[in-house]
Image (tube, rainbow, N blue to C red):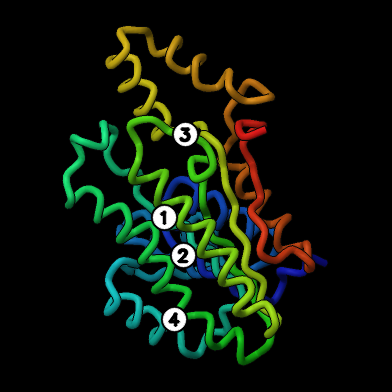
């Protein structure tokens, strides 16, 4: 029987993309779910797809009051797995063309949101002496990503938050790790390749090849692989303070 049976996982940014893929994988492994996001329609659709053991909440993780309301609504639920996945991609532009508002939005969601959700849900885990936190980072926090400075900087911040927080709550029995996917097949990378092709005067296929050829396996990863990685991390009791690279060798 999976170790996730009988446990409740909260997944932020869970209505679509990687969050939904992680939610599906955790649910398939036996966990009960609370998926969190800003779009009610996406959350309702995902929970209808999953059926039993799936619930949803609307929350803006960058807003302290919204996170507090989320925690209050789940006061009677033992959330023992927290997946901080909510994030925004931010602008694709040279740093000198990025506005302060664009920079702040990326950090508000990708870093402050993670801080707020951890602050709200860690105390019960520490009190119980059990819990797992997975912070979704990115290989972009470990290698150059030209014209994406706010995103890359925010993901490096996530990795730093993870390693430090692991030493704060690890002694209480709570594991904190980060998961760093590489480029994931889907609409976001389609957008990036289209923009890069326009910028460089190349075709979409050429822009894609130039990017994925940097990886050892010469390909991107899939959302399903990211979901499987999250489940695998939760099956490793000794994993704490680690950053798991899932990039088909993009960083290797």
Considering the numbered disc 2 on the image, is that residue within a helix, a strand or a loop?
strand
Tell whether label 2 touches label 4 (CB within 8 Å).
no
Q: Identify the element where label 3 is drawn.
A: loop
Q: Is residue 204 above or below residue 130?
A: above
Mark 2: few/some/many CA within 10 Å (<14, 14-19, 20+): many
Which residue is labeled 2 in the image? 35
Q: Nearer the viewer, mark 3 or mark 4?
A: 3
Secondary structure under the numbered disc 1 in the rendered image: loop
Hey, which quadrant is residue 192 in on the image?
A: top left
Is mark 2 in CB contact (under 8 Å) with mark 1?
A: yes
Mark 4, other Cα within 10 Å: few <14 / some 14–19 / many ≥20: some
Q: Is residue 87 positioned above or below 238 on the image? A: above
Image quarter for residue 9? bottom right
Is residue 69 visible in the rendered image? The answer is yes
- The numbered mark, 3 or 1, whose residue comes first in the sequence reads 1
Please report contact status of discs 3 and 4: CB closer than 8 Å, yes or no: no
* Disc 3/disc 4 C-alpha distance (Å): 32 Å
């Amino acid at each position: 029987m999976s170790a996730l049976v009988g446990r409740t996982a909260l997944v932020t940014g869970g209505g679509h993309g990687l969050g939904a893929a992680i939610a599906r994988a955790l649910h398939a492994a036996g966990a009960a779910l609370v998926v969190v996001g800003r779009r009610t329609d996406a959350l309702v659709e995902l929970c209808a797809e999953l059926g039993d053991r799936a619930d949803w909440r609307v929350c803006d993780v960058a807003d302290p009051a919204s996170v507090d309301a989320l925690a209050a609504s789940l006061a009677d639920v033992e959330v023992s797995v927290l997946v901080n996945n909510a994030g925004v991609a931010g602008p694709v532009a040279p740093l000198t063309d990025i506005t302060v508002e664009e920079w702040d939005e990326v950090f508000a969601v990708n870093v402050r949101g993670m801080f707020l959700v951890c602050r709200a849900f860690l105390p019960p885990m520490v009190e119980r002496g059990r819990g797992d936190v997975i912070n979704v980072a990115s290989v972009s926090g470990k290698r150059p990503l030209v014209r994406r400075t706010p995103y890359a900087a925010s993901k490096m911040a996530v990795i730093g938050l993870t390693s430090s927080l692991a030493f704060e709550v690890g002694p209480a029995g709570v594991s904190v790790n980060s998961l760093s996917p590489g480029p994931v097949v889907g609409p976001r990378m389609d957008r990036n390749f289209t923009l890069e092709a326009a910028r460089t005067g190349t075709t979409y296929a050429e822009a894609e090849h130039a990017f994925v050829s940097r990886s050892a396996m010469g390909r991107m990863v899939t959302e399903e692989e990211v979901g499987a990685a999250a489940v695998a991390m939760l099956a490793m009791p000794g994993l704490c303070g680690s950053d798991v690279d899932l990039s088909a060798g993009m960083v290797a």
